[in-house]
Image (cartoon, rainbow, N blue to C red):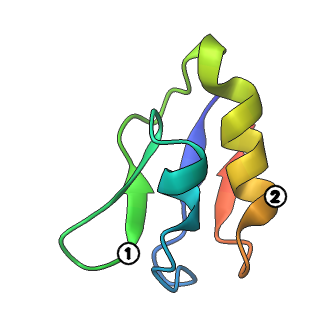
Amino acid sequence: MKAHVDKDTCIGCGLCPSVCPEVFEMQDDGKAGEITGNVPESAGDTAKEAADSCPVSAISVG
């Protein structure tokens, strides 16, 4: 499973790293990014929850 943050869409709200810190982090540009593109099996559900919670649908997990 892979995770991706669309930097053009991201508004930098910080929700995804608060939901799934194993996969997402806030980066120097003030927007979220992936710590790793490959989602660890143990974080699959929370990564999907982060994607579903994104207010601008900037995250894809699959």
Which residue is at the front of the view, 49 or 58? 49
- Residue type at numbered disc 1: Lys
Q: Image point 72% across, 55% down: which residue? A: 51
Identified by mark 2, the residue type is Asp
* First in sequence: mark 1 vs mark 2: 1
Mark 2 surroundings: few (<14), some (14-19) or many (≥20) residues within 10 A: some
**Residue 52 position (above or below residue 14):** above
Q: Is residue 10 left or right of residue 26?
A: right
Residue identified by numbered label 1: 31
x, y percent for residue 1: 66, 26
Q: Which residue lies most toward the front here?
A: 18
Q: Quadrant of residue 56?
A: bottom right
- For image coordinates 57% across by 65% down, the residue present is 15
Identify the residue at image location x=61%, y=49%.
19
Which residue lies at the image location 76% right of the left edge and 30% below the top edge? Answer: 45
Residue 7 horizontal/vertical position (percent): 45, 75
- Per the image, label 1 sits on a secondary structure element best described as loop
Q: Secondary structure at mark 2?
A: helix
Is disc 1 in contact with disc 2, using a CB cutoff of under 8 Å? no
Which residue is the site of mark 2? 52
